[in-house]
Image (spheres, rainbow, N blue to C red):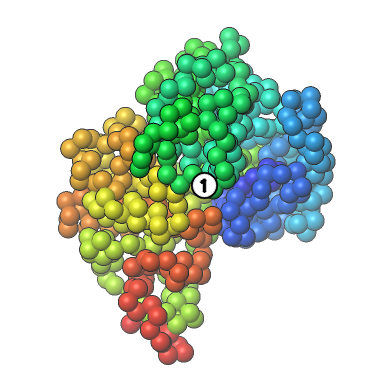
Amino acid sequence: MRVLGVNALFHDPSAALVVDGRVCAAAEEERFSRRKHGKRPVPFAAWELPERAMRWCLDAGGLAPADLDAVAYSFDPALARPSDEMGLPDPWDWLRLRYAERAPQFLATALPGLDPAVVRFVPHEVAHAASAALASPFGTCSVMSLDGRGERSSYLAGRYVDGRLTVLGGQDLPHSLGLVYESLTEHLGFLRSSDEYKVMALASYGTPRFLPELREVLRTTPDGGFVAVAPDWSRWVPAVEPGTLREPHGVQGPRVGPADPADLAASVQARLEEVLVELATALHERTGDDALTLAGGTALNCVANSRLWRESPFEHVWVQPAAGDSGTALGAALQVTAEAGVPIEPLVSAALGPSWSDEELADVLRTARVPFTTPPDLPGEVAGVLADDGVVAWFDGRSELGPRALGQRSLLAHPGRAANTERLNLVKGREPFRPVAPMVLEEDAGEIFSGGPIPSPYMLFVHDVAPAWRARIPATVHVDGTARIQTVGADQPRLHATIRAFKNRTGLPVVVNTSLNTAGRPMVDSPRDALELFGSAPVDLLVLGPHLVRRAGFFEPRPPDGGAA
């Protein structure tokens, strides 16, 4: 069975191809269009489809539109209600629904040869839930989907058994933990539906002194739902001018009393975590399962995920790597496949996007007249640059699905130099308070990190850094003594060998990892994207598969045929 999943209506448009229960390809439109998040989540953009991502998925699977058995669209307009009935201040929401209703025709226009009759609407929260539970390694599991909004709800609690979903609870709009967090993001001067991770980072600098009051504002209910409507944040902290919050108040100067954005962020973050633990506990009382799977934009909150892992009754907590809306393309395709009775193969990697062969990468470099080498010991050479405190742009294999750089499109640096946190934030144009993350050899992770699941391959949990290691890898340690780790195993042989070679030189089985992009731009996807970043950012070495480009030779004139040095 051949199913193309499509996410298009809100933000992070994406496509995924599932063939006979196996995920063959998945990609976000932003990687092709080079427009962060693909588009803004406004009704006037709801008609835009992830056309490049859809076509690439079909090409990757060797399929034409007419070959598809189904197209799974991750929103069901039949379930929606008028926005005013749901308590949402969106007078143009009706336009979004009209576009959704006509999605089959839009899709048939974008993919000539597609029969509109094969388009299936999958409820948004179900698509989120399926992206977690069906992609997970658990045949039976509980599932929670929490995001800003779907058709008429913001939460689904349920259970999957052998590919079949039983819905056990939910929460109707306007109550939404995701929308509350989005509202706070906007109040603190960040971009709503985009910069929520900045609020999570900011929270570590504050004290949750408004938590008692927020427990009255955000609370669970006896029916397994919750009360969550954004309050007037200015009762605690005045609104921040957009783009002006570069340093959390109280970090580089005296605290400013009650008007401290970091304290408000810390308070909301803490209350979110408490509510999630309460919801998970209530769900476990009904299912008794060992495993909880999570999706929805709220599941990208790795601090909350770790608290769920530590404090909920579930033994296992598994989060899908593209937990936000981009993952609903995957979930919709998996749900339609499972409903047809086709067994689903668990997801084993987030590396589901485009890739280039070694020779194709070499051809790109020759065409660009860029000098490069193809060393027999690439891990050793890269480890040497890192040990000498160089910054490395790493491009290898298929690009990642989701917002985390996982060793396919990454910037790497030495973790033992505390200044490298600020250095990388300057390279990328990010706020100085934002942390960078550690990649760690899977076999060494347990010695250094605790308080979260290991292995942790998708960078969706935070871990406590052992006190003895905090001074050894200071660039990767956040202000609260935690780190958002990615464990690297033998399934990433070139990266694993590089970190091992770095360990042999320095004694540190860890390197700094952050996404290969600059502020406001999507992650690098193609070799051309990588060369453009390398040419404009202070990076010392570019890895393109087995090939190396050094800063020292990048601007040297080359003969017309280019070639390797």
Q: Which residue is mark 1?
A: 244
Find residue 112 and report its image quarter: bottom right
Q: Position of residue 313 (x, y in %)?
A: 41, 17
The answer to whether any part of residue 454 appears in the image is no
Q: Is residue 225 left or right of residue 505?
A: right
Mark 1 secondary-structure assignment: loop
Extreme residue toward the top, this view: 222
Extreme residue toward the bottom, this view: 559
Asked if 90 appears above or below 395 in the picture, the reply is above
Query: What residue is rendered at 42% in x and 90% in y?
Result: 559
Residue type indicated by callout 1: Thr
Query: What residue is rendered at 57% in x and 18% in y?
Result: 217
Q: Nearer the viewer, residue 470 or 459?
A: 470
Mark 1 closeness class: few <14, some 14–19, many ≥20 residues within 10 Å: few
Q: Is residue 399 left or right of residue 112?
A: left
Q: Position of residue 564 (x, y in %)?
A: 36, 81
Asked if 73 appears above or below 225 in the picture, the reply is below
Query: What residue is rendered at 28% in x and 53% in y?
Result: 419
The answer to whether any part of residue 210 appears in the image is yes
